[in-house]
Image (spheres, rainbow, N blue to C red):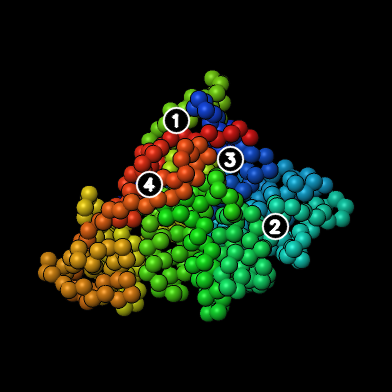
């Protein structure tokens, strides 16, 4: 499996979700009814959120694959960014009413800081750096008490924002990740200091000392998981072993229980229905981040399984049958069947049902890029193959292939260094076959990896292993479920089939209600 094609497909979707009639602003979603009539729509007050989503994912995609952002679109998106940041918070907001806190979508603090950080780092944008510092100053002041937002609207005294849309994890908890990105790209210590201030609060309120779900987790799964990502980043920077262990325990006791083996997880914490592809991607990335600190091979197994069983199957690979709700010469009605291509799941069902939602596609694609970037790592003393995906680097090439019974991973290593190739823990040991330069090698297993000593300037190593099949029962959590559970047939870490409602996650359109 080569993830490059999936990444490019996702990037193309994020180009076609833009409306050239309004300076290429990104739509929120493609609304589709029961009869497959649809149209693209904006969501009021939330367009700034998708501008941030778009920059974060597209710039990462460019850095990782060379994907080109058309000059006209980039210029328009920069204009949109500066305009949307021109408000009393400094973050991307749209149509705010100074007297109505409901119009202040401060949920976008994270996406704004991710965007400003990457624009400063990858485009050497002084404006992005300046805008980011201004946003930090203003949002820090507004959240001086992390439990109470006080937003200065420029008219009268600051207004308080309360309710679910002001929850700490939903607003500034998730922003820790964005602040760290801005710090890493710019070196501005103000971002790190603010990230540390917010992390202190969330270590007290959003996670528990024993790894159980804390009362301060909030309602929104994706925001909770974004907060965890940022907290791992802070704890890692500070080399805080105690807090890293706390987060590892949270993963084991809480996060891993939120998601089914097949990767279904809900948009709201504790809900039964309402899938969320973004949160599935978050958990794959969290597993990878925790592996950096604990070297537990089960974490890498989790990450690759989520990619293979959920993120990739949930991406729409070809045009779908959608007709515009009206035959009018407006962009929101044009080419809907082809513009759906590349969308990743959205409010994805358990075993069927996909939607085309810009926010979800961008978030899932970000997580896929994080996995893609870490397929191969060239360390000081060795090359490490973390995931069994095809990948090409200047001195290392990996080719991954599978048939009905066997998987193979072929590596050409021109670094002159030792190599570690991950062996998934589900692989039957008696099916493992390892060769180096066509000569059999007895596997030397080390913490979930096979160690292969260096073999000159150019070494070709091939790993082959069997793909066991098994069946697993999961509670059926689609809203239209007709029975209590479903039986999934697995081949290795991929879902091969499902006994009802299948084929598994085929492009079966899910109703996406008009806003």
Q: Residues within 10 Å of mark 2 (few under 14, many from 20)?
A: many
Mark 2 and mark 1: Cα distance apart in space: 37 Å
Mark 3 and mark 1: Cα distance apart in space: 17 Å
Query: Where is residue 430 drawn, in percent x and y?
Result: 19, 66
470 vs 112, nearest the viewer: 470
351 to the left or right of 180: left
Q: Nearer the viewer, mark 2 or mark 4?
A: 4
Mark 1, residue position:
337
Earlier along the polypeptide chain: callout 4 or callout 3? 3
Earlier along the polypeptide chain: callout 4 or callout 1? 1
Does residue 15 appear in the picture of this structure?
no
Earlier along the polypeptide chain: callout 2 or callout 3? 3
Mark 3, residue position:
28
214 vs 101, nearest the viewer: 214
Mark 2, residue position:
167
Q: Residue at position x 41%, y 66% from top?
A: 299
209 to the left or right of 485: right
Q: Secondary structure at mark 1?
A: helix
- Res. 34 mark: none
Q: Residues within 10 Å of mark 3 (few under 14, many from 20)?
A: many
Residue at the extreme left of the image, as rendered:
439
């Amino acid at each position: 499996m080569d993830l490059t094609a999936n990444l490019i497909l996702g990037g193309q979707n994020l180009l076609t979700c833009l409306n050239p009639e309004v300076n290429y602003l990104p739509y929120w979603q493609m609304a589709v009814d029961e009869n497959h009539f649809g149209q693209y729509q904006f969501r009021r007050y939330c367009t700034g959120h998708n501008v941030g989503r778009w920059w974060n994912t597209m710039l990462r995609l460019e850095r990782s694959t060379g994907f080109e952002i058309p000059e006209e679109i980039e210029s328009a998106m920069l204009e949109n960014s500066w305009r949307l940041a021109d408000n009393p918070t400094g973050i991307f907001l749209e149509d705010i009413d100074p007297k109505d806190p409901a119009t202040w979508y401060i949920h976008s603090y994270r996406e704004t800081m991710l965007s400003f950080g990457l624009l400063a780092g990858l485009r050497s944008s002084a404006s992005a750096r300046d805008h980011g510092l201004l946003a930090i100053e203003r949002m820090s002041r507004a959240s001086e008490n992390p439990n109470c937002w006080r937003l200065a609207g420029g008219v009268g005294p600051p207004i308080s924002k309360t309710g679910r849309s002001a929850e700490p994890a939903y607003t500034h908890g998730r922003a820790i990740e964005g602040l760290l990105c801005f710090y890493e790209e710019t070196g501005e210590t103000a971002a790190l200091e603010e990230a540390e201030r917010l992390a202190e609060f969330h270590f007290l309120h959003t996670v528990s000392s024993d790894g159980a779900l804390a009362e301060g987790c909030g309602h929104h799964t994706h925001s909770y998981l974004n907060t965890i990502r940022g907290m791992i980043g802070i704890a890692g920077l500070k080399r805080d072993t105690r807090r890293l262990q706390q987060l590892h325990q949270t993963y084991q006791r809480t996060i891993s229980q939120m998601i089914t083996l097949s990767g279904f997880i809900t948009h709201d914490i504790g809900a039964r229905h309402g899938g969320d592809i973004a949160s599935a991607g978050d958990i794959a990335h969290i597993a990878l981040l925790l592996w950096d600190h604990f070297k537990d091979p089960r974490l890498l197994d989790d990450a690759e399984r989520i990619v293979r069983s959920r993120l990739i199957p949930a991406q729409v690979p070809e045009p779908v049958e959608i007709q515009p709700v009206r035959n009018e010469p407006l962009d929101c009605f044009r080419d809907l069947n082809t513009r759906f291509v590349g969308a990743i799941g959205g409010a994805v069902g358990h075993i069927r049902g996909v939607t085309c939602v810009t926010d979800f596609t961008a978030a899932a694609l970000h997580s896929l890029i994080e996995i893609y970037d870490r397929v191969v790592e060239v360390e000081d003393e060795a090359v490490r193959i973390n995931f069994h995906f095809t990948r090409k680097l200047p001195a290392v090439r990996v080719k991954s292939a599978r048939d009905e019974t066997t998987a193979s991973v072929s590596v050409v290593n021109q670094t002159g260094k030792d190599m570690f190739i991950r062996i998934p823990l589900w692989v039957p040991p008696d099916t493992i076959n390892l060769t180096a330069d066509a000569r059999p090698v007895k596997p030397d297993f080390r913490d979930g990896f096979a160690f292969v000593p260096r073999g000159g300037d150019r070494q070709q190593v091939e790993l082959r292993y069997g793909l066991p099949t098994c069946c697993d029962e999961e509670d059926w959590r689609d809203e239209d479920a007709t029975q209590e559970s479903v039986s999934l047939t697995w081949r290795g870490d991929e879902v091969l089939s499902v006994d009802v409602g299948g084929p598994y996650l085929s492009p079966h359109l899910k109703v996406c209600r008009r806003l």
